[in-house]
Image (cartoon, grey):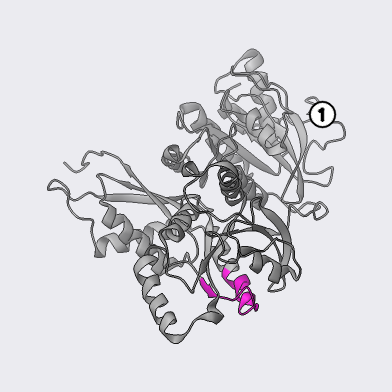
Amino acid sequence: MNIEDLAAAVHDDAVGGAGLPVQGEPGLPGGSSTGGQPVLAVVGRPNVGKSTLVNRILGRRAAIIEDVPGVTRDRVAYDAVWNGRRFTVVDTGGWEPDARGLAGRVAEQARAAIDTADGVLFVIDATVGATDADEAVARVLHRSGRPVVLAANKVDDARAEADAAALWSLGLGEPYPVSALHGRGSGDLLDAVLAVLPEAPREQFTEEDGPRRVALIGRPNVGKSSLLNKLVGSERSLVDDVAGTTRDPVDELVTVGGETWMFIDTAGLRRRVKEASGAEYYSSLRTAAALEAAEVAIVLLDADEPVTEQDQRIISMVTEAGRALVLAFNKWDLLDTERRLDLEQEIVRDLGRVAWAPRVNISARTGRATDRLAPALRTSLESWGTRIPTGRLNSWLGEIVGATPPPSRSGKIPRVLFATQAGVRPPRFVVFTTGFLEPAYRRFLERKLREDFGFAGTPIEISIRVRERPDRHR
């Protein structure tokens, strides 16, 4: 039985009946009608990484994996939890068109999993692209009536994300780039899965589910520990006039603006990690790790002193890590009118490249304006997770390029074909063109994106994918 034949048997045949048991952990539901939690079927052709992705979703090595096709054959169900919501994941064998014998029965099992599922996770090897087999499966999924989330697997770094965008051609919606092996992009993928599954009972709230993680970062002695202590209302972090008192990151739940946050006080960064030594070296490593674990960073600067090269380096560290950003100028209560005017000029001159970051003028000593940190954090985090629909993005891009075409290169003006948002946290965009776009034009596109869509408080990544296309009208 080939895949097209299976499509005709959606409702009439007994493919999803009792004759094909679901194996796995005991007591798991075989479909959406029982068990009280939604069912997600994971399908795709052999060796695209379905079982590896299932293990990533589960957070443990439950599904057997090996670097050969056809390891999974039966439908195997597992309980999974994401963001407090429980659902059942059904791993399936590789689905091949025109399969016969054992491979044909494996394909029937995959089709049965779709019939009994509330949603489908269709996994494709992005390094290979959409094959004839993938297109055949896509046609079956179109006819099934089930909501589908498209996973472009084996996208192990940012350079491969553009390849995933080509999977829009399958007509199944946005392809989510993910690395099942390394976990890259799995959070965004699971958010999309929950969006198409019906509501299920939520797990009891845990500390990991709620507070957003905020890293307090800055050079030594700018007041990071003092600010944390003021927000906590006690001496949670050691404070001393000697720079470098804090060495290990200090985590503390803090209520700011009526919301609970997980603040992480970090060691002051004097220099680049590779230039540090001894305790300072390890403190710098821990600070970098704290930033990686955070969602948003508050970079604290001493408003009473000029903006330094180290301040700028720390801000670059945050943007290069792809974290949301808030700038907090401490010791504002100590400034006279002349210093405030000088500081405004320094900000324009030295921090113009992060003019999009919310700015809060505070005093860690007195608590002045610390309540304004929460709105700034919320703004940055909201922008950090913003996604622009592809249709709207390309309508906007057409207007921008039409009004201001890219500059010519070697006598030719590159054509901008289309764009897609490859990811969020931070927002990442891929622009497909017929030629190289100058860095100045990329900055122009970023500036227009911010003007028209906001993105306050988050870095934006724009990459160019050059595609040589022959003129069809020639």
**Which residues are the magenta region?**
359-376
Q: Disc 1 designates what residue?
A: 18
The percent coordinates of residue 291 (x first, y second) are: 58, 51
- Residue drawn at 62 percent across, 39 percent down: 121
Dot 1: what SS? Answer: loop
Q: Residues within 10 Å of mark 1 (few under 14, many from 20)?
A: few
- Residue drawn at 40 percent across, 66 percent down: 351
Residue 397 covered by magenta stretch: no
Residue placed farthest to the top in the image? 101
Give the amino acid type for the residue marked by disc 1 in the picture.
Answer: Ala
The percent coordinates of residue 321 (x first, y second) are: 50, 50
Q: Give 300 or 169, whichever is nearer the viewer.
A: 300
Q: Give 253 or 106, whichever is nearer the viewer.
A: 253
Decide if residue 225 is on the left or right side of residue 275: right
Q: Give 6 or 397, whichever is nearer the viewer.
A: 397
324 shown above or below 175 = below
The percent coordinates of residue 336 (x first, y second) are: 47, 85
Decide if residue 470 is on the left or right side of residue 376: left
